[in-house]
Image (cartoon, helix red, strand yellow):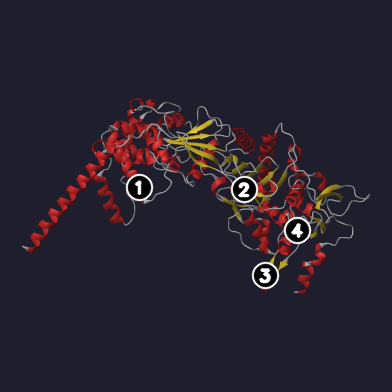
Amino acid sequence: MKTLKILKRLIKLSVFFLFLCMLAASGLYIYAKMSPKLEIKSANAFLMYDTEQELFFQGSGNQEWIALSDISPYMVNATISTEDKRFFDHYGFDLIRIAKAVYINITSRGKKEGASTISQQYARNLFLDFNKTWERKIKEMWVTIELESHYSKEEILEGYLNTINYGHGMYGIENASRFYFAKSARDLTLAEAAMLTGIPKSPNNYSPLTNYEIAKKRQVNILYMMYKNEYITKEEYEQSAQEELNLIGAKEKDTITSISYYQDAVMKELKSLNIPESYLETGGLKIYTNLDQNAQKILEESVNKNLTSENDLQTAAVMMDPTTGKVLATIGGKDYTKSQYNRAVSSYRQVGSTMKPLLYYAALENGFTSSTTFTSEATTFTFANNKTYSPQNYGNSYGDKPISLATAISYSDNIYAVKTHMFLGEETLVDISKRLGITSKLDQVPSLALGTASINMLEFASAYAAFANEGYKVTANFIQKVEDLKGNVLFERKYDKEGILNKNLTFILSNLLTTTYDADYIDYSYPTALSIAPKIKHTLALKSGTTDTDHWSIGYNKDIVTAVWCGYDDNQNLNTNEYKYSRNIWVDAMEGYLEGKEDSWYDMPNNVVGVLVNPITGKPATNQDKVKKILYYIRGSEPSATDTVFDEIYDYKNQESQE
């Protein structure tokens, strides 16, 4: 009897609780009905503008909005069958599906089953999905209720299909249909509709252009679900599963295909900004970016001209305004339709000898000059506990004689770099890197001077920008300003000038970096970038870097910084024939961008003097010297014929023999 009373009481409480829930839900829907109506055709409109304020991308909104009646019934039915088969029977939340998902996830002790309806997914599309907090989820639930209160199921489905992400920068079914199949969404076949329906779950994984076999399996599964849900016959299922698809994968108007990498980078940066949520109420965002479409086109053409699609060799590149850090153009890979991974923004690669300019700037700060010499010779460095390190020059090329800093840069002499690194102290290179804004992990080891650290391209280009702008710290950025559609400014970037380097020394270093393609430095070896010298029409600073798996070229003048990387995603070794690609992409991009412009080089500061010297020895030129070059020095540090060689002070050979 007592148990029966308890059971009756529990039933009454459950009924009462259910009644309260129904009452609360009814109240929410009534309140939502009375609230202002969301303008779903413009909500979440990502309008991106370039530096000329020309619209180059519209992520959603009414530009390519297509009516539900004009969308192929196959597409509509495939979407409902796959995403929300009880779409027309619920009020935004599928309680049966939620209960099933909870049960499966509890019994499997994981999160294998989702329960989002089309209405919920559409509500999520109306946000930029900046984070996944409970507050955000509650707001998404509220928007779902608002959608269900103000709009018919057909209107919600129409909005969903017009805003969902179908990959490759294609938002909305009409954009996607024209991109993948070169036809309007009204003309999609059953097989085509099933293929497109499979993409939004994971656009990177289910794109038929990048992972056809995986996408095909998902398409067949969707066709089978349509058959099981009685949208199609068994014969239609089998025929469509076997249908040959004619995939296009090209935009009709936009000829700069790599611009999608820039769009993705903008969206990634947008998510890091503190954007007020008023954009939701006013219908979307106008994003004023730093994209220079001319620079983007030149960079893309430079890649296409030099890098074929015959193998898996990849590339990444950035063109940056050195005074502000504005990213004018970026390439995240060889072909966006095949790989949306943005290597310029997201990857970290070994930088090789492009690390050396950072080391040599620190050396100039610590008393080195353009003429400071170390002996270029095979060297073994011995440390505590008899640990040794034996770096090698490329091709085992050594002068077996003292060479100047200018020559060491021209040849990218590894022995000179490690001697400098050890002379200054291993912490010095780490310190100057951090001052330049590099946050990647750097170990205080002898090999750091040779670029064994992995650094992100945007971070590294920003460090070089400080050399290019004569000493000011910058941070790479893609977005200048963000407004809502009513013109209210939600974000505007301010550029603060923080001086971190000495202008006299950046002038000296920039001139030293012109030696890398200067034929006057031919002696026992050759300047590292001599092969592209005929292409160089402007005065440019340049340093290349090579590891077993990576090749970089980074350089600049006052107007532009360009960084280019080539390598394989799986870190396979490069062969020597592949070293040429980054250099040629770099020079074609630089000279293409600077074509028709006057030489934009640096004025010599008052505290700097030029001296005619023998470039190899660094000593003042005499009548016996066949080659004479002007090198630059802080006033009072000019070389003399009697200057000592640093090796006479810090003699590694003697150190080894003593040990």
- Image position, residue 98 (x, y; %): 27, 47
Mark 1 surroundings: few (<14), some (14-19) or many (≥20) residues within 10 A: some
Closer to the camera in the image, 520 or 598: 598
Q: Mark 3 points at which residue?
A: 387
Mark 3 surroundings: few (<14), some (14-19) or many (≥20) residues within 10 A: few
Closer to the camera in the image, 26 or 612: 26
- Residue depth check, mark 3 versus mark 2: number of the one nearer the observer: 2
Pick the quarter of the image with the N terminus: bottom left
Q: Mark 1 points at which residue?
A: 137
Type of amino acid under label 1: Lys
Q: Mark 4 points at which residue?
A: 416
Image vertical order of residue 597 relative to residue 141, above or below:
above
Image vertical order of residue 343 relative to residue 256, above or below:
below
Mark 2 surroundings: few (<14), some (14-19) or many (≥20) residues within 10 A: many
> As drawn, is 296 to the left or to the right of 78?
right
Q: Name the residue under label 2.
A: 474
Q: Is mark 2 on a helix, strand or loop?
A: loop
User: Based on the displayed image, in which of its 4 quarters is residue 420 positioned?
Assistant: bottom right
- Residue depth check, mark 4 versus mark 3: number of the one nearer the observer: 4
Q: What element carries label 1?
A: helix
Image vertical order of residue 57 relative to residue 443, above or below:
above
- Residue 11, label in figure: none
> As drawn, is 171 to the left or to the right of 111?
right
* Spatial separation of the CA atoms under disc 1 and disc 4: 58 Å
